[in-house]
Image (cartoon, grey):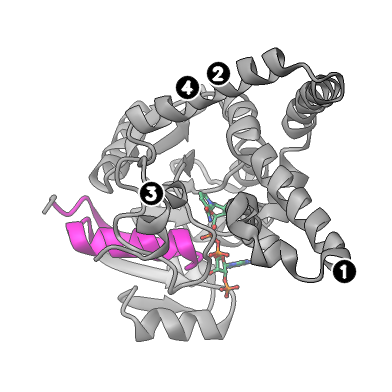
Amino acid sequence: MAETMFNKVALIGLGLIGSSLAHVMRREGLAGEIAGHARSSETRAKAVEIGLVDSIHATAAEAVLNADLVIVCVPVGVCGAVAADIGPHLKPGAIVTDAGSVKATVIAAMAPHMPDGVHFIGGHPIAGTEQSGPEAGFASLFEGRWCVLTPGPGTDPAACDRLEAFWRACGSSVERMDAEHHDLVLAITSHVPHLIAYNIVGTAADLEEVTKSEVIKYSAAGFRDFTRIAASDPVMWRDVFLNNREAVLEMLGRFTEDLTALQRAVRRGDGEGLQELFTRTRAIRRGIIDAGQDEAVPDFGRRGEIVPPE
Ligand code: NAP
């Protein structure tokens, strides 16, 4: 067990990310006290019932009182409003971070509400599942995954080091990166793949009328793996696309060009071109497995994430 790193940690948002943080902080003894806030009384009651937090608060402002570390784990579209609520109540010297999947717009929305003497550093754990809510979390979510921190030019190096040490104690590897660069990288590795999954599942749902449930019956042929991604939280993902518009459109432009080329290859019967691409993509999958970011077991190796290991 690691040493207590912060006397009091406040979690604002107690869904998949917030509850996973609560579990890992408890397991590793990282926080002297965990205070929590979520929007609905249902989530707050559930958080108490399953013992996620030591204290639960009806407002974010109350939850952050005297906290040394505040982690905002709400959909990116409401991070600015949460920052406005908590700003006047933050303890001098506190570290404030977030878990949002988009960085530049979230930082622009949160930073102006951070008082002098409070260290605000954007963050994004590259770890997740398609589940949401306070019961979705598990302590090993961040293990072996990357967490990106996006300090700005004025960030206090000591505060950033402390936050990095915290994420490492949660099991993550940490990389520091420019917020805009993060958004571009995540557009292609996460946001566009989700958009593609939402699209293909939507198209198949429209076809369902025609195919009379054969889409579901034969889903193991490949479709099923898209449905897992397309089952991700609608509000979270709506906010991601509203907040990372430019980078997503840039990557979507490239994707569309490549898809058109692929369409042409299929039409022309260009077997050599198809095989060459499929060989290259297979190597990328191998690279992901070699890097420990997935397992080479069937079902895309997701079982360990769907059934939280205890
Ligand atoms: P989630 O499971 O849907 O939970 C969101 C939490 O935020 C809920 O507790 C919700 O409360 C609370 N919330 C929503 N609006 C709020 C508001 N205005 N004030 C206070 N609390 C509010 O979402 P999540 O998956 O944990 O995602 C949280 C953040 O982490 C998002 O920014 C997301 O982009 C990022 N992230 C997600 C993943 C992933 O795979 N899911 C991975 C990395 C990063 P109620 O339950 O009461 O509605």
In contact (CB < 8 Å): disc 4 and disc 2: yes
Closer to viewer: mark 1 or mark 4: 1
Q: Is residue 199 left or right of residue 226?
A: right
Q: Is residue 150 left or right of residue 111?
A: left
Q: Could you say whether the residue bearing mark 3 is in a helix, strand or loop?
A: loop
- In-front residue for pair 20/156: 20
Closer to viewer: mark 1 or mark 3: 1
To which residue does mark 1 refer? 209
Give the quadrant of the C terminus.
Answer: bottom left
- Please tell me in which quadrant of the rendered image residue 11 appears: bottom left
Closer to viewer: mark 2 or mark 3: 2
Q: Is residue 263 left or right of residue 183?
A: right
Q: Amino acid at mark 2?
A: Arg
In contact (CB < 8 Å): disc 1 and disc 3: no
- In-front residue for pair 137/164: 137
Q: Could you say whether the residue bearing mark 1 is in a helix, strand or loop?
A: helix
Give the class, few, some or many, for how many residues have Cα within 10 Å of label 1's Cα (few <14, many ≥20): few
Q: Amino acid at mark 3?
A: Ala
N-terminal of the pair, mark 2 or mark 1, is 1
Q: Position of residue 281 (x, y in %)?
A: 56, 24
Residues at marks 4 and 3, CA–CA distance in whole angstroms: 44 Å
Q: Report the span colored magenta.
A: 3-32
In the image, is residue 8 part of the stretch drawn in magenta? Answer: yes
To which residue does mark 4 refer? 283
To which residue does mark 2 refer? 280
Q: Amino acid at mark 1?
A: Glu
